[in-house]
Amino acid sequence: MKLTDYLTDIPHPDLCLYLDLNLEEPGKIKSDFWSKLIPYSLLVDGIQTVVRRPVYLDYRSFKQLNAGRPNVNVLQSIKRNKRVLDYMLDEKSFSVFVVRHGESMNFRTSPLCDPYLKFYGPEPRISIAETGSCFQYLPFGRDRHLKKAFVDTHTSNISDQKDILVNAGFSLGVTPQRSMWAEMIEDQPNLTIDYECLQMGHYNQVVLDHGSDGCELYASKLVRSKFTLCPPSKTIDTTRFWDALSVGSIPLVLSTGTGLKNVNYGLSQIDDFYTHVEDLHVPFLILSPETFRNLTDKDLEEAWEEFLGVDWNFNCLTSQYWLDDMQTYIDLGPILRQGDPVLAKK
């Protein structure tokens, strides 16, 4: 769908993918995405032995497998549990395993691929060529804390509301590079940037510490903006990227070399990660400090006109897109196994 058409048919926020997995209280999961997946712990306990849906790594299993600790390969731990794998691969099907989001679960090494098991996970720090066919990057999705504000202000046609060229609205205290970028933004003489949300506070005060008024202001700024500044945080992927895209605002990813406190990635990991985002075919721009300093309003207005006329994959912003993608892989199992004697023995 072209961006110009998407702006006249913005999906309702309820349809979008959200970073809202409540790891400690899975019974409270309300998301259309996560609530339709099976917690891994139910398979470990033998409570669920027939699996026709994707399985996700819930909080209890996350703790038991020491997932997120250095040098712990949770994918290999999962594949070593033959009894659970038998449940997942019942009747010669294929299976999908969804790994939780979180800064400690970034993929830094290539998984060992098996033809019958596909992993969906967050923020790979290796390129799409290295992850192979058994891994699919799953976006962070939108911020559930802002959902009510977007629901309350939702309208499907926002094509006449894009009156802000660039929006800056991120908290500063998460990593030192956020503060560095804020200084560069304020010193940029050639861009018309809306600073209102950025100036509301510091660490997480942009929306969370200003209640419903702050959330609604933040949501309205994204809806009205053609471009949104999206500096990485402790993670490269951010919910701001997906919140912006969902309302037709192009993310401007602010990238720079690191080695800073609280940041464990560099330019090569940023570049590798965005090969996965590019593969989804969604619009965004990556800017180095030098490129950002030289940008003008004219540059971005011209870029906006180009973005408007391109066909993009906005479907990947919805939870149903990912549920369908996973189920298609699961349903392919019996068909592919019948035609392949090697897979038939798995």
Image: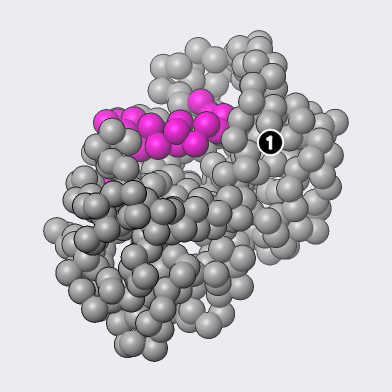
Task: Name the residue located 37 percent from the left edge and 82 percent from the top edge.
Answer: 49
Q: Give the range drawn in magenta.
A: 262-285
Please tell me whether residue 270 belongs to the stretch shown in magenta.
yes
Task: Name the residue located 22 percent from the left edge and 65 percent from the top edge.
Answer: 79
- Expressed as whole percent of the image width and height from the top left, the position of residue 282 reads 55, 33
Q: Which amino acid does label 1 sit on?
A: Gly
Say how the picture is coloured.
one colour
Task: Name the residue located 24 percent from the left edge and 78 percent from the top edge.
Answer: 83
In the picture, measured across the screen, residue 19 lies left or right of residue 151, that is left
Q: How crowded is mark 1: few (under 14 residues within 10 Å), some or many (20 or more)?
A: many
Please tell me whether residue 276 belongs to the stretch shown in magenta.
yes
The single residue placed furthest to the left in the displayed view is: 71
Q: Which residue is at the front of the view, 311 or 300?
A: 311
Q: Circle 1 — which element?
A: loop
User: In this view of the protein, can residue 212 be seen by the observer?
Assistant: yes
Q: Which residue is at the front of the view, 317 or 184?
A: 317
- Expressed as whole percent of the image width and height from the top left, the position of residue 37 reads 49, 69
Residue named by callout 1: 248
Task: Name the residue located 33 percent from the left edge and 55 percent from the top edge.
Answer: 337
Q: In this view, does 48 lie above or below 62?
A: below
Q: In this view, does 52 lie above or below 262?
A: below
